[in-house]
Image (tube, grey):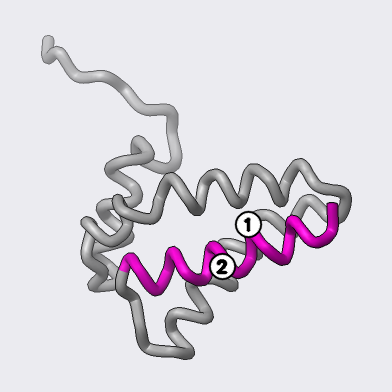
Amino acid sequence: MTDVALEPEGLPAAETWLEEICDALHMKRKVLAAVTPSIIDLVHHVADSPGDQDDAPLTAFLIGFAAAKDGDFSAEAVQGRVNVVARTLDSHR
């Protein structure tokens, strides 16, 4: 018998999934690690705001989409986009 933690069927554990996706998309994991707390916090705040529940994950997508449009995937550039969205969210409170 092996000492392996079994995952529920479907997606692998979160870290493994994100690492796998970073590899598949040819993205640097350290950039993801640098912006993950900000993205998670922003998505949480969007989800807690009035509006459609789909707005939260789509907001994170739009930050990534803006990175693709601008061609700048650095942690600083992504954080800048997070800050723009956070200020926009704050203006609606």
Residue nearest the observer in this picture, 77 or 29: 77
Q: Decide: marks 1, 2 in contact (CB < 8 A)? A: yes
| Image: magenta residue range | 75-93
Mark 1 neighbour class, 10 Å CA radius: few under 14, some 14 to 19, many 20 or more: some
Lateral position of residue 39 relative to residue 23, left or right: right
Q: In this figure, which residue is indicated by the disc labeled 2?
A: 61
Q: Quadrant of residue 27?
A: bottom left
Using the image, determine if residue 75 lies above or below residue 70: above
Q: Residue 70 in the image: state x and y as whole percent.
A: 44, 89
Q: Please state if 48 lies on the left or on the right of 57 as rendered.
A: right
Q: Residue 45 location, x and y as percent?
A: 68, 45
Name above or below for residue 24 compared with residue 44. Answer: below
| SS under mark 1 | helix
What kind of residue is marked 2? Phe
| Callout 2 secondary element | helix
What residue is shown at x 64% (from left), y 59% (from top)? 86
Prevailing secondary structure of the magenta residues: helix
Query: Which residue is at a point 78% across and 50% down the rendered structure image?
Result: 53
Q: Which residue is under mark 1?
A: 57
| Depth check, front residue: 58 or 86 | 86
Q: Quadrant of residue 88?
A: bottom right
